[in-house]
Image (cartoon, helix red, strand yellow):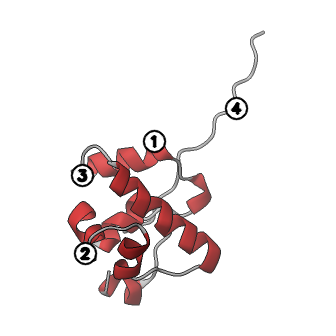
Amino acid sequence: MGSTAHNTPPPEFDGDGFLVDPLRWDKPLAEQIANADGIGQLTAAHWAIIQQLRDHFLAFGSIQPETHLCHVNALDPACASDLFRNMREAWRIAGLPNPGEEAKSYM
């Protein structure tokens, strides 16, 4: 008999396309989401924003304002909107859970 492979179920997304469990995120998944959204190849600037979003959310459980997010990465104040179209898309690519209706309205 061969060895039994442990199959991990694919990451689960909610009805709005947000990853349910942010700990199931990895870089290949981010690249898949970005490609599906038409972003294409993620650059160093994309990865800086993605990592900053994840670090802030995992530490504080909240959304970091776009201007601060860009400032700490020495990027233009509207960097996230320029790189991702909007903060909601950046949040999804970063593999973070649905922030709720109020937060989505100003992303």
Look at mark 3 in the image and give the residue it sits on: 39
Q: Earlier in the sequence, mark 1 or mark 4?
A: 4
> What is the secondary structure assignment of the residue under circle 2?
loop
Choose between 68 and 28: the one closer to the eye. Answer: 68
Q: Are marks 1 and 2 in contact (CB under 8 Å)?
A: no
Query: Looking at numbered disc 4 in the image, what kind of residue is underneath it?
Result: His
Residue named by callout 4:
6
Q: Earlier in the sequence, mark 2 or mark 3?
A: 3
Quadrant hosting residue 78: bottom left
- Number of numbered markers: 4
Comparing marks 1 and 2, which lies closer to the viewer? Answer: 2
Q: In the drawing, does residue 95 fall left or right of residue 93?
A: right
In the image, 4: left or right of 80?
right
> Residues at badges 4 and 3 in contact (C-beta under 8 Å)?
no
Real-space Cα separation, disc 2 to disc 4, in angstroms:
43 Å
* Inter-mark Cα distance, 1 to 4: 19 Å
